[in-house]
Image (cartoon, rainbow, N blue to C red):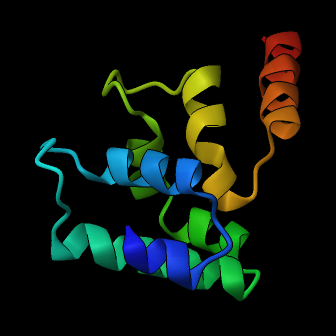
């Protein structure tokens, strides 16, 4: 967590949310695989490549955003974790509103 606070412009609240998502075993720690994925996401964002990252790692990203493990992503889950990929609350709301109109 200290690394993310010092090495990014994320706020403590956002870092805590990210850590909670990656700490899947609820031990207060993350393993190397989770740390590596966080670094990959942060590098993609820093290089302005978040769309490409989402495309190339869509299953992994979906599984991360699906916090409750129901194999579907709710608007709240999307809003809770979407900020990591620079998806604002307004964009998340628009996505779910647009999908409602299509269905």
Q: Position of residue 5 (x, y in %)?
A: 52, 72
Q: Specify the quadrant of the image occupied by residue 75.
A: top right
- Quadrant of the image containing the N terminus: bottom left
Q: Residue at x 77, y 34 (%)?
A: 92
Q: Position of residue 35 (x, y in %)?
A: 30, 74
- 92 to the left or right of 43: right
- 22 to the left or right of 102: left
Q: Is residue 2 above or below residue 77?
A: below
Q: Nearer the viewer, residue 83 or 12?
A: 12
Q: Is residue 42 above or below residue 88?
A: below
Q: Is residue 72 above or below residue 15?
A: above
- 4 to the left or right of 1: right
Q: Specify the quadrant of the image occupied by residue 10.
A: bottom right
**Count of labels in the image:** 0
- Quadrant of the image containing the C terminus: top right
Q: Residue at x 27, y 67 (%)?
A: 34
Q: Is residue 40 above or below residue 17?
A: below
Q: Residue at x 55, y 56 (%)?
A: 12
Q: Position of residue 44 (x, y in %)?
A: 62, 81
Q: Specify the quadrant of the image occupied by residue 3.
A: bottom left
Q: Position of residue 6 (x, y in %)?
A: 53, 81
Q: Residue at x 24, y 50 (%)?
A: 23
């Amino acid at each position: 967590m200290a690394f993310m606070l010092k090495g990014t412009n994320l706020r403590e609240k956002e870092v805590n949310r990210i850590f909670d998502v990656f700490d899947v075993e609820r031990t207060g720690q993350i393993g190397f695989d989770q740390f590596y994925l966080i670094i990959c996401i942060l590098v993609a964002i820093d290089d302005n490549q978040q769309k490409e990252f989402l495309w190339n790692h869509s299953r992994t990203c979906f599984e991360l955003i699906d916090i409750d493990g129901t194999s579907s992503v709710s608007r709240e889950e999307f809003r809770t974790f979407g900020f990591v990929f620079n998806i604002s609350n307004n964009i998340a709301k628009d996505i779910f509103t647009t999908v409602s109109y299509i269905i």
